[in-house]
Amino acid sequence: MGKLKPIASEDRRVVNVKSADYIPFISDGIEDGSVLQLGDSKPLGSGFHIYRMTPGQTTVAHKHQSDEEFYIIEGDLVDHDGTKYGPGDLVWLRKGTEHTSYSPNGCLIVVYLDA
């Protein structure tokens, strides 16, 4: 590969997930949490991103058009069927799964969702 050159500033983005500015995520015309997504090659809320829910927030019921994977960084999340997730949990939901989630105390989640 030879000697690597430095990475140009326009080719790298770095933010701290605790202090970064999040963008409201709109689902079916309703604000549905907020998103931190550095890459701009995929629609907001798809690909790799951080999703934040405030205490007491419930997501809009939705059906995924692709598999969804998420990792709970902090906080708690409860799916509509009563399944509870907490820090350290890695979750996979099959394409076509319909669900809504509630966060009693707020949460920060790493998400991967194909566009």
Image (tube, helix red, strand yellow):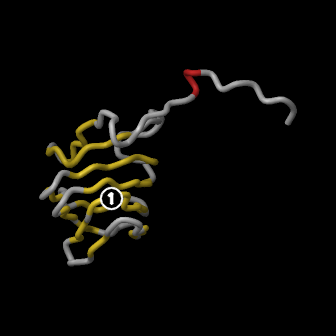
Q: Residue lying farthest bottom?
A: 82
**Residue occupying image coordinates x 34% and y 42%:** 18
Residue 38 lies in quadrant: top left
User: Viewer-proximal residue, 85 or 23?
Assistant: 85
**Residue occupying image coordinates x 24% and y 60%:** 62
- Picture layout, residue 25 above or below residue 65: above
- Picture layout, residue 10 above or below residue 63: above
Q: Position of residue 37 (x, y in %)?
A: 40, 39
Q: Position of residue 93 (x, y in %)?
A: 39, 69
- Picture layout, residue 25 above or below residue 103: above
User: Viewer-proximal residue, 101 or 60?
Assistant: 101
Count of numbered circles on the image: 1
- Picture layout, residue 100 above or below residue 47: below
Q: Quadrant of the N terminus?
A: top right
Q: Residue lying farthest right?
A: 2
Q: Considering the numbered disc 1 on the image, is that residue within a helix, a strand or a loop? A: strand
- Decide if residue 109 is on the left or right side of residue 12: left
Residue 73 lies in quadrant: bottom left
Q: Which residue is mark 1?
A: 74
- Give neighbour class at mark 1: few <14, some 14-19, many 20+ (Cα, 10 Å): some
**Residue occupying image coordinates x 48% and y 33%:** 14
Q: Position of residue 7 (x, y in %)?
A: 65, 26
Q: Position of residue 15 (x, y in %)?
A: 43, 34
Instruction: Name the amino acid type tagged 1.
Output: Glu
**Residue occupying image coordinates x 21% and y 78%:** 82
Residue 56 lies in quadrant: bottom left
